[in-house]
Amino acid sequence: MTKNIIALAGPPCSGKSTVGRILSVSLQADFIDIDCRIEAETEHTIEWIFNNKGEEAFRAVEKKILLQAVTGSVPRTVIALGGGALLDLESRTRIERKTILFTLSASPETLVDRNSGQRPLAVDPSGLRTLLKNREGHYLSLGNQVSTGNRTPQQVSEIIRKAALPLLSPQDRLF
């Protein structure tokens, strides 16, 4: 089955949103940032949702928006997933079935250096390191690993573009 949606997964600070924006421009594709959609739909920041409603409520909204994005996307779409979006089995199954999934990664040191402290489960270096340790197996189990550690977002975008082109639907290879 050919596909025409590219999804970017990976831990916080791995570059999903930045690379996704660049990739969508180079592919002349729509771009969906799941975290931005959550904030727009709920009219609250992700941090506010975590602090006032809890992680379970956040994950429910995240799953709903992720499933809508995959189902309702136009051909040629790039989706940046949240760091924990694929912990949910239904979401992971849908993403793996309907998209070409790339998983961005970097060393814990690089991710800590990139962290601005705006992530509810990784406010400080210790929290991010704990999250990375707890999810290490999960991230490694996801397909098409691409290291972002010593590469610019443009370089990562180009690596993904070249890898994705042969996998895209024939009508979507015209980039």
Image (tube, rainbow, N blue to C red):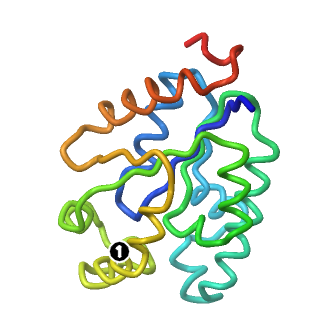
Which quadrant is the C terminus positioned in? top right
The percent position of residue 11, horizontal first and vertical second, equals 41, 64
Residue bearing the label numbered 1 = 132
Q: Residue at x 56, y 80 (%)?
A: 48
Q: Quadrant of residue 117?
A: bottom left
Residue at disc 1, secondary structure: helix
The percent position of residue 40, horizontal first and vertical second, equals 67, 59
Q: From this viewpoint, which residue is outermost toward the top?
A: 174
Q: Quadrant of residue 158?
A: top left
Which quadrant is the N terminus positioned in? top right
Image vertical order of residue 14 relative to residue 171, above or below = below
The percent position of residue 150, horizontal first and vertical second, equals 18, 44
Q: Residue at x 24, y 67 (%)?
A: 108
Type of residue at label 1? Answer: Leu
Left or right: 84, with 13 as reference point: right
Image vertical order of residue 32 relative to residue 86, above or below = above
Label 1: few (<14), some or many (≥20) within 10 Å? Answer: some
Image vertical order of residue 169 relative to residue 45, above or below = above
The percent position of residue 125, horizontal first and vertical second, equals 24, 78
Q: Residue at x 69, y 15 (%)?
A: 170
Left or right: 22, with 6 as reference point: left
Image vertical order of residue 101 relative to residue 116, above or below = above
How many numbered marks are there? Answer: 1
Left or right: 136, with 77 as reference point: left
Q: Residue at x 30, y 47 (%)?
A: 147
Of residues 165 and 8, which is closer to you in this image?
165
